[in-house]
Image (tube, rainbow, N blue to C red):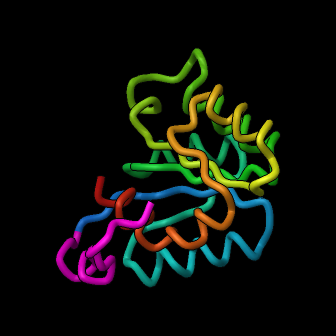
Amino acid sequence: MIVQGFDPFDAVLENESYEMVLYSAADLLWATRIKSTADAMGVPCRPARTAAMLRARLGDSEVRAVLLDLDAPEQAWELLAVLRGPDAGERENSIRVIAWGPHVAVDLFAKARELGADEVLTRGAFASALPDLLVRLGTG
C-alpha cells in the first residue's frame, strides 16, 4: 500500500524514533534489498531467520513488525508460530506480520493468512511499497 502524497524521506527527517523491524528473507538479494532500504529510511532492521533468532531479537529490542518471505515457507511458518501460536503472548500478538511471495503462490498466501499474517503481498507489491512500508511499520 502506497500512501499518496506521503514522502517517506520527509518522515525520516521528522521522526527520530523508529522501532525495530525484523525480516526473514529466502535469499541474499531480498535480505540486502530490505536492509539497504531500511538503512536509507533510517528504520532499524535486523534479520531473524529462525525461531531462536526471533526470540533473541524480541528479548533485546522493541520490535514493531516482522517481514516474512514466503519463498521459504517452513521458515515463515516457524516464525509465525512464535508470533501467533498458542504460546504467543500479548506482546508477540501485537507485532505486525507482513508476508510476501510470488503472485502464483495462492496456497502459501492463504496459509500465511490462516496462521496470522496481518498482510500478505505479492512480490511486486512488496518491492514497490517497501520504503513506505518500512516507515509505516517502524513508526506504528
Left or right of 113 in this view: 28: right
Q: Is residue 31 above or below residue 66?
A: below
Question: Where is residue 80 drawn, in percent x and y?
Answer: 63, 35
Instruction: Residue at 75% x, 55% y: name it.
Output: 103
In the displayed structure image, the side of residue 65 where residue 138 appears, left or right: left
Picture coordinates of residue 118 (x, y %)? Answer: 50, 39
Quarter of image, res 136? bottom left
> Closer to the camera, 91 or 109?
109
Q: Which residues are magenta?
A: 1-16
Residue at the (51%, 78%) spot, across then down: 37
Q: Residue at x 45, y 60 (%)?
A: 1
Q: Does residue 55 appear to the left or right of 51 in the view shown?
A: left
In the displayed structure image, the side of residue 83 where residue 13 appears, left or right: left
Q: Could you tell me which residue is drawn at 55 percent across and 73 percent down?
A: 128
Residue 140 percent across, percent down from the top left: 30, 52
Residue 119 on the magenta span: no
Residue 4 is a magenta residue: yes
Residue 106 occupies which quadrant of the picture? top right
In the image, farthest residue toward the top: 86
Task: Count all numbered tags in the image, as a single digit.
Answer: 0
